Amino acid sequence: MEIKPVAILHSPIQGKFGLPRQSGLASSLGCELQLLPPYNREEALRGLEGFDYIWLIWEFSLADSRSGDSAGVPLTVRPPRLGGNAKVGVFASRSPFRPNRLGLSSVKIESIDAARGVIRVSGADLADGTPVYDIKPYVPYADSHPDARGGFTDSVAWKPLEVVIDPQFLSADIDIQALREILSLDPRPHYQDDPQRIYGLSFAGRNVRFRVSGGTLTVVAIE
């Protein structure tokens, strides 16, 4: 089967570093889904205005290749939620290192510009330029399972970081609320914990520099 993108997602996050590890965690992060020909026509979007969320099937286009079994597919991965040390099977994780590099994300529809073939969404965990291979409406009666077990995610506590941004940076021409949410998720690799290290996050064309000490992340510059 040959699949081709139906859309390209445009996001303020230009690379892997800083991406939310799941969709919906940074609910203020706004993105645009630009449909590609021949799907950038009103007919393809007819009826979508009646839904609040959509599923995106997309490619982990920035994922590095990994060696694994004879087919080159890793059979086990180290989820960040487990500290980056414990291993689980690839099918018990949402790691980007997958047999077919396909991702699945639920995002909220903010608006639809059918004439331009653009869907504005929020809460995406995709980088700028990510190819999207299919779009499906989120249907609550079939897609929501509030009593379902969550495997290892049920037993591992997670707490967002407190984000401190000096008032001098608040005038930057970027979405500060979305930036706060992304930084609170702790973009660092989970095996790194150096309070003196300065990290750089590319966001909306700016280099956001920060350090983390304990449970507090402090922005030291927005360049």
Image (cartoon, rainbow, N blue to C red):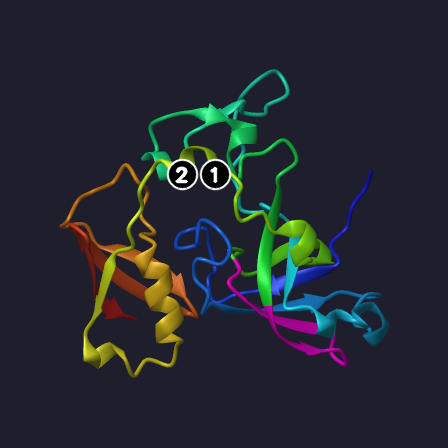
Residue visible at 31% across and 48% down in the picture: 188
Residue furthest to the front in view is 147
Q: In the rendered image of this protein, does residue 210 appear above or below residue 167?
A: above
Label 2: few (<14), some or many (≥20) within 10 Å? Answer: few
What's the magenta region? 109-124
Label 1: few (<14), some or many (≥20) within 10 Å? Answer: few
Which of these two is toward me, 16 or 165? 165
Q: In the rendered image of this protein, does residue 220 appear above or below residue 5?
A: below
Which of these two is toward me, 122 or 187? 122
What residue sits right under mark 1 in the picture? 150
Residue type pointed to by label 1: Gly
Q: Position of residue 133 (x, y in %)?
A: 72, 52
What residue sits right under mark 2 in the picture? 154
Side (left or right) of 184 relative to 114:
left
Q: Position of residue 65 (x, y in %)?
A: 54, 33
Side (left or right) of 214 relative to 62:
left
